Image (spheres, rainbow, N blue to C red):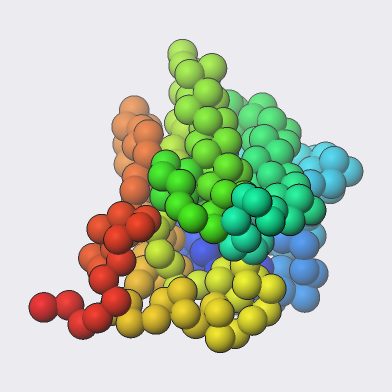
């Protein structure tokens, strides 16, 4: 099961996992894109808004008694406003999708994950969940909270065979992440990656998720932080050719 799989990292994860032989549930809000991705990879389409309790209940019913892998990817960033000018609607939406959506889906699917031999929960977090940066208050707050959910869940599931992992990317040139964050401003979105040699791709992150899921059942990768070579930290990005 991959949430937010209609595009970006979610789509890449669904595609990569299908290559590994998974029967993939492709879920997201956009029906046309969900059906397109599912058709491309031979997966199962399901329109789901992770913030809608009825959708989440329908998702759990569709999955049934067993689920081997859940990739909580639905989420994203909205805006880059400083705290003093915070768009509270945007902050609220980020918290609803990144945090409460992850909790709702995980809660609904835990019985099916526990029924698997080694059910695995992978949350697509962010380096924004570890270090704050200017203009990132709302997104960082959501990702810090999501990270807390991951760590708490791992503690609470200790003694079961369920694995809980966070894959936390740094700068990823995604098809829509920066554009959505900048409210459709293409110039502002392009500036995010300006001068950076080879940001991560969606496929790079999907490869990390596939590796985490492929390990023997007794091996848990608590957290994987992955950045492009040009990014040493959230606040230190080399914007010129590498030498």
Between 191 and 84, the residue placed more toward the observer is 84
User: Who's the residue at 30% across and 61% down the image?
Assistant: 236
User: Who's the residue at 50% across and 72% down the image?
Assistant: 174
User: Who's the residue at 69% across and 44% down the image?
Assistant: 95
For residue 194, side relative to residue 98 (left or right): left
Between 50 and 126, the residue placed more toward the observer is 126
Give above or below for 100 relative to 233: above
Give above or below for 240 relative to 142: below
Which residue appears farthest toward the right when viewing the image? 54
- Number of on-image labels: 0
Give above or below for 81 relative to 99: below
Which residue appears farthest toward the left when viewing the image? 243
- Say which quadrant the C terminus sits in: bottom left
Between 38 and 150, the residue placed more toward the observer is 150
For residue 159, side relative to residue 33 (left or right): left
Which residue appears farthest toward the top when viewing the image? 159
* Image location of residue 51, percent across then percent down: 79, 47
* Residue 103 appears in the picture as rendered: yes
For residue 188, side relative to residue 32 (left or right): left
Between 215 and 150, the residue placed more toward the observer is 150
The answer to which quarter of the image holds residue 48 is bottom right
The answer to which quarter of the image holds residue 198 is bottom left
* Image location of residue 96, percent across then percent down: 73, 45
User: Who's the residue at 41% across and 50% down the image?
Assistant: 127
The answer to which quarter of the image holds residue 136 is bottom right
Which residue appears farthest toward the bottom when viewing the image? 187
* Residue 26 appears in the picture as rendered: no
* Image location of residue 80, percent across then percent down: 59, 62
* Image location of residue 104, percent across then percent down: 72, 36
């Amino acid at each position: 099961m991959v949430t937010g799989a209609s595009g970006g990292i979610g789509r890449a994860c669904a595609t990569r996992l299908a290559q590994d032989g998974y029967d993939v549930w492709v879920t997201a809000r956009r029906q046309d894109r969900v059906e397109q991705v599912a058709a491309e990879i031979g997966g199962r389409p399901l329109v789901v808004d992770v913030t809608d309790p009825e959708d989440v209940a329908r998702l759990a019913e569709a999955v049934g008694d067993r689920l081997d892998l859940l990739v909580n990817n639905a989420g994203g960033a909205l805006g880059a406003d400083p705290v003093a000018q915070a768009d509270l609607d945007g902050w609220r939406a980020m918290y609803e999708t990144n945090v409460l959506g992850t909790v709702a889906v995980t809660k609904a699917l835990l019985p099916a994950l526990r029924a698997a031999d080694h059910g695995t929960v992978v949350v697509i977090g962010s380096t924004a969940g570890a270090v704050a940066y200017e203009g990132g208050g709302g997104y960082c707050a959501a990702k810090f909270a999501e990270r807390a959910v991951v760590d708490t869940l791992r503690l609470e599931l200790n003694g079961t065979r369920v694995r809980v992992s966070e894959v936390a990317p740094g700068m990823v040139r995604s098809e829509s992440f920066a554009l959505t964050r900048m409210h459709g401003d293409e110039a502002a979105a392009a500036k995010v990656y300006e001068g950076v040699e080879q940001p991560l791709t969606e496929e790079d992150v999907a490869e990390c998720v596939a590796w985490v899921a492929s390990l023997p059942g007794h091996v848990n990768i608590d957290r994987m932080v992955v950045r492009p070579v040009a990014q040493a930290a959230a606040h230190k990005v080399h914007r010129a050719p590498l030498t």
